[in-house]
Amino acid sequence: MVPITHFLVLSALLFAIGVAGVMLSRNLIVMFMSIELMLNAGNLAIVAFSRQLNMMDGHVFVFVIMVVAAAEAAVGLAIIIMIFRNRGSINADRFDLLKR
């Protein structure tokens, strides 16, 4: 049996990699993947705690989160594709639509 600390350390490491990817990257695809990585790190922590407490509620909650994440991924990727078609780049530094 694997202790819960191993799952939580892995979850924290994945979340930290996701934060670093969002902060350091200027590519929208990499930023989007990093946000998904952070979401999955949270899911891993929820499942680890659910398993530790012998409750299935956390597993069901993670499935709901995954369904919402799949819909978010589809919409987010469609937005990124439209930005690329209109701007010709997916570099986050080049977006100045909201600036005066």
Image (cartoon, rainbow, N blue to C red):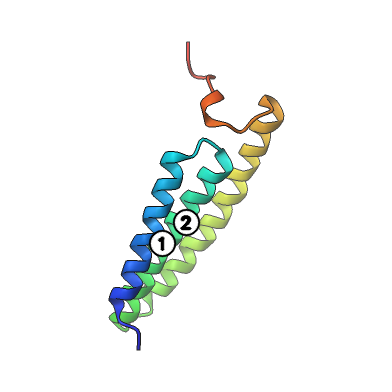
10 Å crowding of disc 2: few (<14), some (14-19), many (20+): many
Numbered circle sitting on residue 41: 1
- Horizontal and vertical percent position of residue 19: 39, 48
Q: Could you say which is closer to the camera, residue 16 or residue 85?
A: 16
Up/down of 82 relative to 9, above or below = above
User: Residue pushed farthest right?
Assistant: 85
Image quarter for residue 7?
bottom left
Q: Secondary structure at mark 2?
A: helix
Image quarter for residue 3?
bottom left
Q: Quick check: 94 left or right of 46?
A: right
Q: Secondary structure at mark 1?
A: helix
Residue at the image position 37 percent from the left and 67 percent from the top: 10
Q: Could you say which is closer to the camera, residue 84 or residue 67?
A: 84
Q: Are marks 1 and 2 in contact (CB under 8 Å)?
A: yes
Q: Amino acid at mark 1?
A: Ala
Residue at the image position 47 percent from the left and 56 percent from the top: 37
- Horizontal and vertical percent position of residue 83: 64, 31
Label 1, label 2: how many angstroms apart (C-alpha)? 6 Å
- Horizontal and vertical percent position of residue 86: 69, 26
Q: Quick check: 59 left or right of 49?
A: right
User: Residue pushed farthest top?
Assistant: 100
* Residue carrying label 2: 37
